[in-house]
């Protein structure tokens, strides 16, 4: 079997952070702008962190720059780590631990991330869920604001880290949003979507993912899909 690279999204796919990131973001923005109007209706699903910050600043008619967005995200990660340090923990979605353990013991299968989180935010969330050690490489929101640009970055890093070459037909995106599905299709990769996030199964189905599951709980069958289909 040729090497398989499985690139997982984080929020809504592996874990639910139980609203902690939105709380942390609201705290940071309120501390910087005393009259900040937070767009509570904005759907973060599948968005990159810089994209989210830019939207929130535009919504409140604030000027922004790449430098300012980086500063806000730095403060956000500090606040996020405080929240998790204070005892809040992410919820790991059904089947995630079982699937990861099954995959990591399968020959020629390698794990990584494609996530809108900046790399430090990803580390904080996954360490809080005790999952970080399984994902040594990835493409992150601080690599590009455009999620479609992240899979090639993750692939290149994985090829260096694992000393393998991965063909497009052997690379999977596993995610919970239409943007996960879109970035897989736009890069000619395979996709398995799960409806464990904020996007409904109906909305996911409307953009035609290759496979669509309610969750990862039947991890033996999902292992079969990812490894052998």
Image (cartoon, helix red, strand yellow):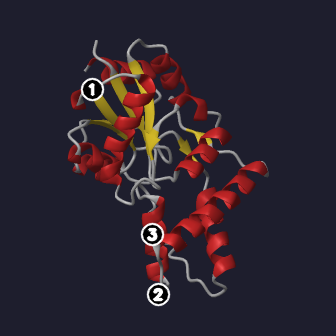
Q: Which mark is residue 42?
A: 3
Q: Nearer the viewer, mark 2 or mark 3?
A: 2
Q: Are marks 2 and 3 in contact (CB under 8 Å)?
A: no
**The furthest residue to the right:** 86
Viewed as shown, does residue 112 lie left or right of 86?
left
Between the C-alphas of marks 2 and 3, the distance is 15 Å
Viewed as shown, does residue 10 lie left or right of 165?
right
Q: Residue at x 65, y 65 (%)?
A: 75
State which quarter of the image contains the C terminus: top left
State which quarter of the image contains the N terminus: top left
Viewed as shown, does residue 165 lie left or right of 141?
left
Front position in the image: 178 or 122 = 122
Between the C-alphas of marks 1 and 2, the distance is 44 Å
Mark 1: secondary structure: helix
Between the C-alphas of marks 3 and 1, the distance is 34 Å
Disc 1 crowd rating (10 Å Cα; few below 14, some 14-19, many 20+) is many
**Image position, residue 65 (x, y; %):** 46, 76
Precedes in sequence: disc 3 or disc 1: 3
- Residue bearing the label numbered 1: 170
**Image position, residue 9 (x, y; %):** 44, 43
Q: Which mark is residue 61?
A: 2
Whether residue 213 can be seen here: no
Q: Nearer the viewer, mark 3 or mark 1?
A: 1
**Image position, residue 159 (x, y; %):** 37, 29
Mark 3: secondary structure: loop
Q: Are marks 3 and 1 in contact (CB under 8 Å)?
A: no
Whether residue 11 can be seen here: yes
**Image position, residue 139 (x, y; %):** 42, 45
Q: Are marks 1 and 2 in contact (CB under 8 Å)?
A: no
Precedes in sequence: disc 1 or disc 2: 2
Disc 2 crowd rating (10 Å Cα; few below 14, some 14-19, many 20+) is few
Q: Residue at x 40, y 29 (%)?
A: 160
């Amino acid at each position: 079997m040729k090497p398989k690279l499985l690139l997982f999204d984080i929020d809504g796919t592996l874990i639910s952070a139980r609203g902690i990131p939105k709380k942390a973001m609201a705290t940071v923005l309120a501390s910087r702008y005393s009259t900040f109007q937070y767009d509570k209706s904005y759907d973060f699903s599948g968005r990159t962190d810089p994209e989210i910050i830019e939207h929130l600043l535009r919504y409140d008619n604030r000027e922004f720059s790449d430098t300012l967005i980086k500063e806000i995200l730095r403060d956000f990660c500090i606040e996020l780590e405080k929240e998790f340090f204070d005892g809040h923990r992410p919820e790991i979605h059904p089947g995630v631990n079982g699937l990861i353990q099954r995959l990591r013991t399968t020959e020629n299968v390698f794990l990584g991330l494609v996530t809108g989180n900046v790399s430090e935010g990803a580390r904080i969330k996954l360490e809080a869920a005790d999952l970080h050690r399984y994902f040594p490489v990835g493409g992150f929101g601080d690599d590009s604001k455009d999620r479609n640009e992240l899979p090639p970055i993750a692939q290149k890093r994985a090829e260096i880290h694992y000393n393998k070459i991965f063909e497009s037909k052997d690379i999977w995106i596993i995610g919970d949003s239409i943007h996960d599905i879109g970035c897989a299709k736009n890069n000619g990769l395979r996709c398995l979507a799960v409806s464990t996030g904020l996007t409904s199964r109906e909305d996911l189905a409307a953009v035609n993912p290759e496979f669509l599951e309610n969750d990862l709980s039947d991890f033996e069958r999902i292992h079969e899909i990812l490894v052998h289909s």
